Image (cartoon, rainbow, N blue to C red):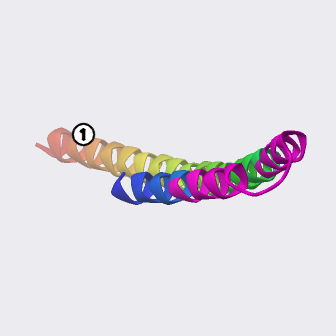
């Protein structure tokens, strides 16, 4: 969680810096508002792309982990059934 908080902090600081830079620029108010709107859209699109990449990675890794867990479960189930059958065989021999 620390890494994600650090990344969000850096992105927030960059956005605030850009906002303040545009805010104190010597342009007319309408130009400044347009610049803020354009920069906000750019940052939003950039952030959305990064979040989509992160979610895709999580989904992919989650699927791999789930598949591995199913394989381990099936392996354990097969081992259990083999031991159960072996125990029945030993019991029937006595």
Residue drawn at (89%, 39%), measured in percent from left and top?
30
Mark 1: give few (<14), some (14-19) or many (20+) Cα within 10 Å.
Answer: few
Count every numbered label the image shows and give the total: 1
User: What residue occupies the far left of the structure in this picture?
Assistant: 94
Q: Nearer the viewer, residue 89 or 5?
A: 5
Q: Nearer the viewer, residue 67 or 50?
A: 50
Residue with the mark numbered 1? 88
Q: Position of residue 27 (x, y in %)?
A: 83, 53
Q: Is residue 36 magenta?
A: yes
Mark 1 lies on a secondary structure that is helix
Q: Is residue 52 visible?
A: no
Q: Position of residue 72 (x, y in %)?
A: 42, 53
Q: Is residue 5 visible?
A: yes
Magenta-tinted stretch:
13-39
Residue drawn at (72%, 54%), measured in percent from left and top?
22
Residue drawn at (36%, 49%), measured in percent from left and top?
76
Q: Position of residue 64 (x, y in %)?
A: 57, 56
Q: Position of residue 66 (x, y in %)?
A: 52, 47
Quarter placement of the C terminus = top left
Q: Nearer the viewer, residue 5 or 39?
A: 39
Residue drawn at (40%, 60%), measured in percent from left and top?
3
In this image, 5 relative to 11: left or right?
Answer: left
In this image, 17 relative to 1: left or right?
Answer: right
Q: Is residue 38 magenta?
A: yes
In this image, 78 relative to 67: left or right?
Answer: left
In this image, 4 relative to 38: left or right?
Answer: left
- Main structural element of the magenta stretch: helix, strand or loop? helix
Q: Nearer the viewer, residue 89 or 75?
A: 75
């Amino acid at each position: 969680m620390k890494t994600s908080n650090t990344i969000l902090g850096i992105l927030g600081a960059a956005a605030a810096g850009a906002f303040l830079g545009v805010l104190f620029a010597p342009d007319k108010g309408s130009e400044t508002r347009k610049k803020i709107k354009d920069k906000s859209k750019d940052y939003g699109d950039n952030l959305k792309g990064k979040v989509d990449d992160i979610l895709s990675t999580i989904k992919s890794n989650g699927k791999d982990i789930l598949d591995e867990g199913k394989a381990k479960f099936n392996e354990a189930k097969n081992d259990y059934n083999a031991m159960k059958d072996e125990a029945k065989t030993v019991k029937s021999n006595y």
